[in-house]
Amino acid sequence: MASVLIIDDDDVARAVLLRTLTLAGHEAVGARDGVEGMARFRDHPADLVITDIFMPNQEGLATIMELRRSAPGLKIIAISGGGARASLDVLPVAEALGAQRTLRKPFTPAEVMETVRAVLAE
């Protein structure tokens, strides 16, 4: 199984992702924003990072760019519900910056697991 870092400022979404991935046998850890996520990644590199886009301190697009610079082969999934800017669709930008896949919130645990399996198989 894979080690997965989940970066999301939404405590409930992060907890659901952590539980879903842990129950599937993955080693999962969480971070509340890109700054904390990058610190965790530097200390314990993951096989896969799932990052939200709209977060305080360091948002997801900057986090994806930083991850790409430090770990070019890293698997990344970007997630977003649009936040306060729900009409703003930045998931295509996340893909252009290096995310292999994207998920729009709300998503089901089955959608998460299907996406994680696909990305890890690449």
Image: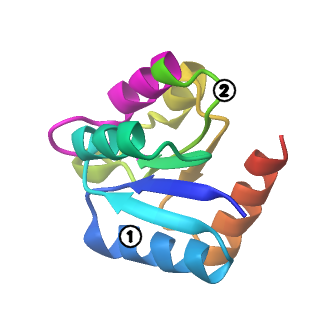
User: Which quarter of the image is occupied by the N terminus?
Assistant: bottom right
Task: Count residues near mark 2 (Cα–Cα under 10 Å), then give few for <14, some for 14-19, many for 20+.
Answer: few
Res. 12 in view:
yes
CA separation, marks 2 and 1?
A: 26 Å
* Label 1 sits on residue: 13
Decide which of 89, 98 is in the foreground and name it: 98
Of the two numbered discs 2 and 1 on the same chain, state the one appearing first in sequence: 1
What are the residue bounds of the magenta stretch?
52-69
Give, as a three-letter code, the residue at label 2: Gly
Q: Secondary structure at mark 2?
A: loop
User: Which quarter of the image is occupied by the C terminus?
Assistant: top right
* Label 2 sits on residue: 73
From the top left corner, tell me how far across and down residue 41 is, in percent: 41, 41
The residue sitting at 29% across, 40% down in the picture is 39
The residue sitting at 23% across, 35% down in the picture is 58
27 vs 79: above or below? below
70 vs 114: above or below? above
Decide which of 61, 92 is in the foreground and name it: 61
In the rendered image, the residue lying farthest to the right is 121
96 vs 64: above or below? above
From the top left corner, tell me how far across and down residue 11 is, in percent: 27, 70
Judged left or right of residue 13, residue 93 is right
